[in-house]
Image (spheres, rainbow, N blue to C red):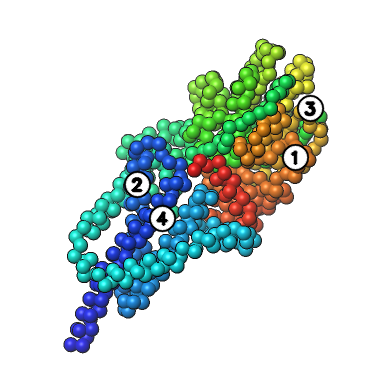
Amino acid sequence: MFWIKNGRQYREQTSQKISWGHWFAFFNIIWAVAIGSRYAFLIDWPHTFLGRLYFFISILGHFSFIAFGLYLLVLFPLSFIIKNERTFRGVSVIIATIATTLLLVDTEVFSRFNLHLSSVVWNLLVNPENGELSRDWQIFFTPMPLMLLAQMLFSRWAWYKLRSLERQKWIRGVGIMLTGLFITTHLMYAWADAYLYRPITMQKSNFPLSYPMTARTFLEKHGLLDKQQYEIKLDQEGRPDSPMINYPKHALSYNNVANKANLLIITVSGLRQDAVQKEKMPALTEFAQQATQFTNHYTTGNNSNSAIVGLFYGLNANYTDSLLNNKKTSVLIEKMQQDNYQFGLFSATNFKPSIFRQALFHQIKLPKNTSNKRKIDNLSAMKNWQVWFEQRSVDQAWFSYLNLDVGELTRQQHLPTLEQEQQFYTQQLSQLDQQINSVLTTLKAHNALENTAVIITGEQGYSFQKTDDELLNYFAPEEIQVPMIVAWKELNTGVEDKLTSHMDVIPALMHDLFYVKNTDADYTQGHNLFNQTQSFNEWVLVANYRWDVIITPDGTQYHIDNKGNYQKYNRTYQKVVSRRPPLGLFLDVYQQNSSFVEK
């Protein structure tokens, strides 16, 4: 009888704790939704009814699932293990208080860095190397005692009112509704992801621990989604979860310029840093000796789109998708259009990279790209430029952009051996050297160099015997370190070995050619490339949609991805064991990545 009585008592106590746990979980769902509503003031607010409806559905569905999931995974098992109800309720209160406090801290992390808490972010917050930042974050733990008190009061009240609460029938309907909202959230996102409906997909990372369901594979399998069309649209419009961009932050104003300067920019996709030497490109090497050559220069990404973003926008490559999605042109292009510059735009690939047609030159009529596999023709691009230059008005300032390619041209040959590929690449460099020299010779023949800034650089370098898949997250020096040659009357000739980036070009042009009044931070993340007296970058950033790669002056690379994975490489791109990540550098990168995000 003793065992029967004791067993019945245990079951009754356990049943009470489980019933109390349901109400305690419901109380914390309300807490989580209340705190989580702060994200509505931190995100890019959707402009459509469906996007806003999704936000309200997702906040209720997501936080109810997280709170109830925490109960099922932690408190529910503890109700069987901890026999004393006061101890059980005390443990539950402590766990709930810690969880709600972390959620509050996460809202502030998201506000500052557009990221959620992770092991790397947490280390940044408590990093003893930055005591001021650590003190700032301690403020967000001050509400913890009040949260603890509220949890304790509800815990005690709910326990003594348990019988009355158990008679409430509406709670079951609320539970069914919240479950339905959670399912609806994922179904809506799966639809939006398949059809690239951005007012919903841009909310993918709004909340912590949010992993919305996608169903592209299922839809493709059943013929409801065309994979090829989807990838084309993705390339043109950018990744659907990209945030809205605030660029420039403020309207730009300029000083009056009596004699407007001309501007010629030549970019070569696949031009390695070591290509500019007398044996390979004698004409360009000679021109570089009469100009300013930046020998420790890096592109902003390992593909054409991300490189152009750095060169023409002065932003790091993390903003590529946002620029595509929002069809933002560069402040440089806008200024020259306002000043009625003559535009001469020429491309060996017919402006194949999507950033040209979708964002940078979307307001300018370009030749139609009739095929994604269009032949690369550097010679025709150069000749077309010469025709335009001869026909231009000599009384009007001009801007010309010549986009050439040697990397994809080499890769398309699919040469089987390293020796054959290197030989073909060298041959193409020789032809490219002659073509660029023809452009420079034409400028000299018309005495146009005196009032023309000439910039010659690579979009990205070239790595031999690599496939497209291997290059996707490959950041070796031969891939990202490129030549930067600038001829401008106000620059001294010679070699500059300071660490520089594509992002440094825009502030240089805006200051030295167009005399902008605004501070650099209003429209760029770079430094003035032409200012040879100022201290230059302590690091530069190369990125793609997954990796941020920090490069220091000695060539050391620190890689961190969007999941917090960290790797270190030396200047020869050999992986180095590193147990202590450079938290200060990561903090700077996170702040830079969020500096132009619209909030």
x then y, percent, for residue 312: 62, 32
x then y, percent, for residue 489: 79, 27
Q: Nearer the viewer, residue 529 or 153?
A: 153
Q: Are marks 2 and 3 in contact (CB under 8 Å)?
A: no
Dividing the picture into quarters, in which one does residue 25 lie? Answer: bottom left
In-image side of 385 versus 276 (left or right):
left
Residue located beneath label 3 in the image:
489
- Amino acid type at circle 4 is Ile
Q: Which numbered disc, 2 or 1, marks the residue that appears first in the sequence?
A: 2
Residue located beneath label 4 in the image:
35
Residue located beneath label 2 in the image:
56
x then y, percent, for residue 525: 63, 41
The residue sitting at 72% across, 20% down in the picture is 258
Spatial CA span between label 4 and label 1: 50 Å
Q: Secondary structure at mark 3?
A: loop
Instruction: Report the disc number at residue 352.
Output: none
Q: Nearer the viewer, residue 423 or 117?
A: 117
Q: Which numbered disc, 4 or 1, marks the residue that appears first in the sequence?
A: 4
Q: Quadrant of the N terminus?
A: bottom left
Spatial CA span between label 3 and label 4: 57 Å
Q: Secondary structure at mark 1?
A: strand
